[in-house]
Amino acid sequence: MDIAWTVAGGIIGFVAGLLLRSTVFRLSVASGEPAPTCCARCGARVGGRFAIRCTQCHGWFGVPFVLELVTAAVVALLLWRFAGLPDAAPFAFIGALGVALAAIDIAVQQLPNRLTLLLYPGLIALFGLATAVDGHPSYLLRALLGGLVLGGGYFVLAVLSRGQLGGGDVKLAGGIGIALGWLGWPTLLVGASLGFVLMGVVSLVLLIARRITLQHSISFGPFMLGGALVAILAVA
């Protein structure tokens, strides 16, 4: 049964990655710059809300299949973790959207409001439906409190860090807090901590390899999401 859910998650994730490709392409721009409307190769206009390849030169918007395969892997893992449970849908939702957010943050060090703010109504609605099915309203209350706690904690850190953490990180933290809070306070603590641990380890490795210097700025969103994913999969 778990294998069937895992395979279904891989298929759902792959399709979600295809649908999100054009969104990632359009939102992967520096702050203040307009969204791209033309193919960088041939100049043809990007058509359709879910455009994947240029209709004129047939070039892909982004690296072919990477976004789709990563999204497929993440959603497959999450559906394996929550096989048949009513809370599988909200975790698959944040998993797919999280991959898109990580891709954008890696590309341009931005976490666009269009996706981070979408997490809130989406997760609240889906966890609300899960609450109606499993009859545990305390889980939903804890999830909402988790969003407030983690989002508020990141807001304080953003103020104290003087720009090291951005508004996008704060908004993303609130969404992650909702998902982690649903599973319990220990999961929230572990997931929040792992983001900093993963960033520290990767930064140290890159410094030793001389790929970055102490003056470099590294996107934190992917580490926040990665830490949350590990906690969701590993903490009971």
Image (cartoon, helix red, strand yellow):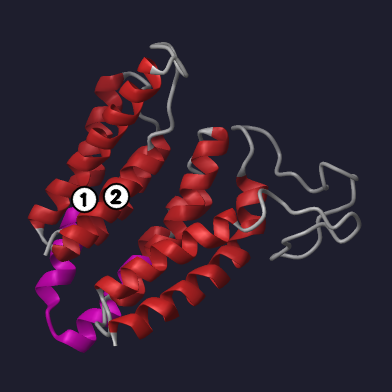
Which residues make up the magenta segment?
122-147
Type of residue at label 2?
A: Gly
Residue 51 position (above or below residue 108): below
Q: Distance between the residues labelled 1 and 2?
A: 6 Å
Please give the label number shown on residue 174: 2
Local crowd size for mark 1, using a 10 Å CA cut-off: few (<14), some (14–19), many (≥20): some
Q: Quadrant of residue 124?
A: bottom left
Q: Report the residue marked by disc 1.
A: 148
> In front: 48, or 233?
233
Q: In which quarter of the image is residue 53?
A: bottom right
> In front: 157, or 180?
180
* Nearest to N terminus: mark 1 or mark 2: 1
Q: Quadrant of residue 4?
A: bottom left
Q: Can residue 126 be seen in this view?
A: no
* Residue at 75% across, 44% down: 36
SS of the residue under disc 1: helix
Name the side, left or right, on which 182 lies relative to 31.
left
Cβ atoms at labels 1 and 2 below 8 Å apart: yes
Q: Is residue 133 visible?
A: yes
Type of residue at label 1?
A: Leu
Give x and y (percent) for residue 17: 56, 63
Give x and y (percent) for residue 22: 67, 57
Considering the image in quadrants, where does the C terminus appear? Answer: bottom left
Residue 210 position (above or below residue 77): above
Local crowd size for mark 2, using a 10 Å CA cut-off: few (<14), some (14–19), many (≥20): many
* Residue at 21% across, 44% down: 192
Give x and y (percent) for residue 190: 14, 47
Considering the image in quadrants, where does the N terminus appear? Answer: bottom left
